[in-house]
Image: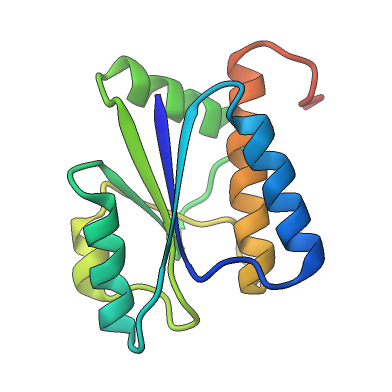
Amino acid sequence: MRLHLITVGEPKLAYARSGWDEYEKRLRRYHKVQVSRVSGKTQQAESEAILKAAGKSPLILLDPRGKQFSSEKLSEYLDAEALGGHGELAFAIGGPDGHTDALRGQAKLLWSLGELTLPHDLAMLVLVEALYRAATISAGEPYHRG
């Protein structure tokens, strides 16, 4: 399955850039990965850029109002989406003001990384690591020790 990772901006801090690069590289062992960095001067412009980047792919928005997954449940969800015939899923992290209600309404799923507020750079890193961890769980590999 292709995973399209869409972010408003890119990691600015060295630890986040390094971590993103490492986990993106690891994730590519299991999935085709496309990364799109978008921008906008307003929340509306950012949401429009995300929607345009996602194209016709089902859109999963990272949003504090969303569903929380354990690593195992995320793995199961991604496996079910792949078996359901989705060749690509688009995951999007918005800007500092989040997503518009209109974009939320068009999303297949709202996914929350948890109740904590994370800095933008850290949220990007957690996203790519969580997807990598889910892929290793699906593959039955020992990265995740549960």
Q: In which quarter of the image is the N terminus?
A: top left
* Residue drawn at x 33%, y 15% as measured from the top left: 83
Residue 137, picture quadrant = top right
Query: Taking 124 as reference, is 37 left or right?
Result: left
Residue 120, picture quadrant = bottom right
Classify 121 as above or below 75: below
Image label count = 0
Q: Is residue 71 visible?
A: no
Q: Is residue 72 visible?
A: yes
Q: In which quarter of the image is the C terminus?
A: top right
The outermost residue toward the bottom is 41
Query: Taking 126 as reference, is 103 left or right?
Result: left
Classify 29 as above or below 11: above
* Residue drawn at x 56%, y 21% as measured from the top left: 30
Query: Taking 18 as reference, is 104 left or right?
Result: left
Q: Nearer the viewer, residue 115 or 130?
A: 130
* Residue drawn at x 58%, y 17% as measured from the top left: 138
Query: Taking 131 as reference, is 14 left or right?
Result: right
Classify 118 as above or below 7: below
Residue 26: percent from left, percent from top: 68, 31
Residue 100: percent from left, percent from top: 28, 76
* Residue drawn at x 51%, y 71% as measured from the top left: 9
Residue 50: percent from left, percent from top: 31, 63
Residue 53, picture quadrant = bottom left
Which color scheme is applied?
Answer: rainbow
